[in-house]
Image (spheres, rainbow, N blue to C red):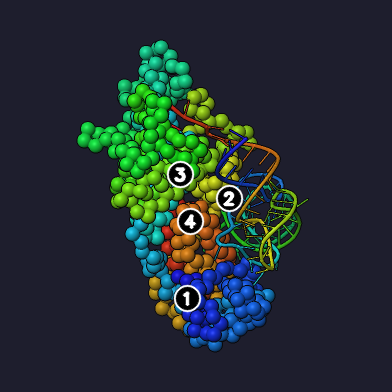
RNA sequence: GCGCCAGUAGCUCAGUCGGAUAGAGCAACGGAUUUCUAAUCCGUAGGUCGCAAGUUCGAAUCUUGCCUGGCGCACCA
């Protein structure tokens, strides 16, 4: 990618010089046009060791770079206030843009195997908007990881064992038999619906969750049932606990069996086998994460709702404890906490509770504003921001909705290209390329794509791709405004067609990662 | 009481590895359309980056303390 190439050139050039800088140069993008296309702060870093002022060093660095033929072919360096600013020349920029392609992107290879676990909602009720948030973030994260060549699988953990499920069954049969819902049981219209049906309530609930998620474009490689942890041949709960015991992290007290999670930063130790001999929910969780390791995953990523963040410490503790096992090496475990979504309608908060009938479900939101808008809005913000989501606003603003803004850019591109054929490309100039300001801007944005998705993937932050997509659309719309294509001179037209084609492919890539559609017309 | 997350423009939020003069969208106001789809573009206005100290050439960003809001603190799941 362009940025890395320039970094390499500069690092090379400086390491050959007498300036004595051997570590890698990292470029940043300046905020102001007059500061060029890229900038580096080497001079500040060198100031201490060289005992010279940053201005003086920046001056010298620029001299070295501008003497270097590999660098000067591409751009020009100039010092300002201690920064080294780099302005690329149009020819160098265009040559790289012309040669670049989404199919030729080159990402570092790695043997890491990611497992992204997300949603994992209890099968005791319909999905709410919060689940929708983890769902779109998780699915886009998996798309993103795969796109940069990282091996990643996705998984939904089904809590189909334990008290809550029993209570759920009891609630449905209670209504069915006219005896009413037990204390602390589940209420709501969906319980009454399930009671009317002959279907197994748990199966019905799972099927419906799966359908809603599929409708949202969210599919999983694996639906892992808690109940499958214990099988006639293999009892994974027993195995996981005995592994921990072998490592010395299990003890008995007050008639129960405990895991010493305080050794790994938890507030208190946790019970895994109750005094009555039954396993706790946490025991299943230990076993579940144990199977992630036995299945060969080395990078565990869990998306939890903020209402479950209390488990983070203990689960991290068990994964850390498992590092003592001989087949486990170099495992990392990252928990992404998705903050809750507050739903509003006309500025009034809409409460969501499984225990009352008054409930807005994920499905309702999708019906109301559409899948693309639902995904875009839920994906747009960083997961650790508390999201206020006003439905009436999302509907009202639908005419200048950001999701339409980015899709419209794509539709405009498709429309123009449909009126042209590749014959026009013969007029392309190879030398003496001129670029208008908005052409230049759009070219630089396209070339940034590779860098953006790589860093978004490393930081497990798909929302950065949303941000980029919006910026790209913005720079396209501006380009469109000032650079006619159909009426342009042949060589200029050819040049702009190249730009459109590159844009079209990058937009398609972005939409693919975000999971929204790419309309050819609107 | 303890823990996690947040606090940036009227509202909703970006802000990379600490960089130069703080960034968008919406809302407000003023403009642009004989045109490749105006679902667009241009401009104006709007700031004590919660508060206070510290680290340093430089802090919205890192450290510490405090304030406010959300969530969580079971031998429930």
Quadrant of residue A42 in the image?
bottom right
Instruction: Return the x and y of residue A314 as percentages of the image width and height.
Output: 45, 40
CB within 8 Å, label 1 to label 2: no
In the drawing, does residue B45 fall left or right of residue B13? Answer: right
The answer to whether residue A214 is above or below residue B34 is: above
Same subunit, tags 3 and 4: yes
Pick the front one: A265 or A69: A265
Same subunit, tags 2 and 4: yes
CB within 8 Å, label 2 to label 4: no
Q: Which mark is residue A47?
A: none
Q: Which mark is residue A264?
A: 3
Identity of the residue drawn at 50% across and 81% down: A15
In the drawing, does residue A351 fall left or right of residue A513? Answer: right
Distance between mark 1 and mark 3 Cα atoms: 41 Å
Q: Which residue is mark 2?
A: A400
Answer with mark 1 or mark 3, whichever residue precedes in sequence: 1
Distance between mark 1 and mark 2 Cα atoms: 42 Å
Chain to which the residue tagged by mark 1 belongs: A
Instruction: Return the x and y of residue B68 as percentages of the image width and height.
Output: 69, 38
Q: Secondary structure at mark 2?
A: helix
Front: mark 1 or 3: 3
Identity of the residue drawn at 34% across and 54% down: A329
Same subunit, tags 1 and 4: yes
Answer with mark 2 or mark 4, whichever residue precedes in sequence: 2
Q: Which residue is mark 4?
A: A459
CB within 8 Å, label 2 to label 3: no
Answer with mark 1 or mark 4, whichever residue precedes in sequence: 1
> Is residue A85 visible to the viewer in this orientation of the structure?
no
Pick the front one: A424 or A442: A442
Answer with mark 1 or mark 2, whichever residue precedes in sequence: 1
Q: Which mark is residue A8?
A: 1
Distance between mark 3 and mark 4 Cα atoms: 24 Å
């Amino acid at each position: 990618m362009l940025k890395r190439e320039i970094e390499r050139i500069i690092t090379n050039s400086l390491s050959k010089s007498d300036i004595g800088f051997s570590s890698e140069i990292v470029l940043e993008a300046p905020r102001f046009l007059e500061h060029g296309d890229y900038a580096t702060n080497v001079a500040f870093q060198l100031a201490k060791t060289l005992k010279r002022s940053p201005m003086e060093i920046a001056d010298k660095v620029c001299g070295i770079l501008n003497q270097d033929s590999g660098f000067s072919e591409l751009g020009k360096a100039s010092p300002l206030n201690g920064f080294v600013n780099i302005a690329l020349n149009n020819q160098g920029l265009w040559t790289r843009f012309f040669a670049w392609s989404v199919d030729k992107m080159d990402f570092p290879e790695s043997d890491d195997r990611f497992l992204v676990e997300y949603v994992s909602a209890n099968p005791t009720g319909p999905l709410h908007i919060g689940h929708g948030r983890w769902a779109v973030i998780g699915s886009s994260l998996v798309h993103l990881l795969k796109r940069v060549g990282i091996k990643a699988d996705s998984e939904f953990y089904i809590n189909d064992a334990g008290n809550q499920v029993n209570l759920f069954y009891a609630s449905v049969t209670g209504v069915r038999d006219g005896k009413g819902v037990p204390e602390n049981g589940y209420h709501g219209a969906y319980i009454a619906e399930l009671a009317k049906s002959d279907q197994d309530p748990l199966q019905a609930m799972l099927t419906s969750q799966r359908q809603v998620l599929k409708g949202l474009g969210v599919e999983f490689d694996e639906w892992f049932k808690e109940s499958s942890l214990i099988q006639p041949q293999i009892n994974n709960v027993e195995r996981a606990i005995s592994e921990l015991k072998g490592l010395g992290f299990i003890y008995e007290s007050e008639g129960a069996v405990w895991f010493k999670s305080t050794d790994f930063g938890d507030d208190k130790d946790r019970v895994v086998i109750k005094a009555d001999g039954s396993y706790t929910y946490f025991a299943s969780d230990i076993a579940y994460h144990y199977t992630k390791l036995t299945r060969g995953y080395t990078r565990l990523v869990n998306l939890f709702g903020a209402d479950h963040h209390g488990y983070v410490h203990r689960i991290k503790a068990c994964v850390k404890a498992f590092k003592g096992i001989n087949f486990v090496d170099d495992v990392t475990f990252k928990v992404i906490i998705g903050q809750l979504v507050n739903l509003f309608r006309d500025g009034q908060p809409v409460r969501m509770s499984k225990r009352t009938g008054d409930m807005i479900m994920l499905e309702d939101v999708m019906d109301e504003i559409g899948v693309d808008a639902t995904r875009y809005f839920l994906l747009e913000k960083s997961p650790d921001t508390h999201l206020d989501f006003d439905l009436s606003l999302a509907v009202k603003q639908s005419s200048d909705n950001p999701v339409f803004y980015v899709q419209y850019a794509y539709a405009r591109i498709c429309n123009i290209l449909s009126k042209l054929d590749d014959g026009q490309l013969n007029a392309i100039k190879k030398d003496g390329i001129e670029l208008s300001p908005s052409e230049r801007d759009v070219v630089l944005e396209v070339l940034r794509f590779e860098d953006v998705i790589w860093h978004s993937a490393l930081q497990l932050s798909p929302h950065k791709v949303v941000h980029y997509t919006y910026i790209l659309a913005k720079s396209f719309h501006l380009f469109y405004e000032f650079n006619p294509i159909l009426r342009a001179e042949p060589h200029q037209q050819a040049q702009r067609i190249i730009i459109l084609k590159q844009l079209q492919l990058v937009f398609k890539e972005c939409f693919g990662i975000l999971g929204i559609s790419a309309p050819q017309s609107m």
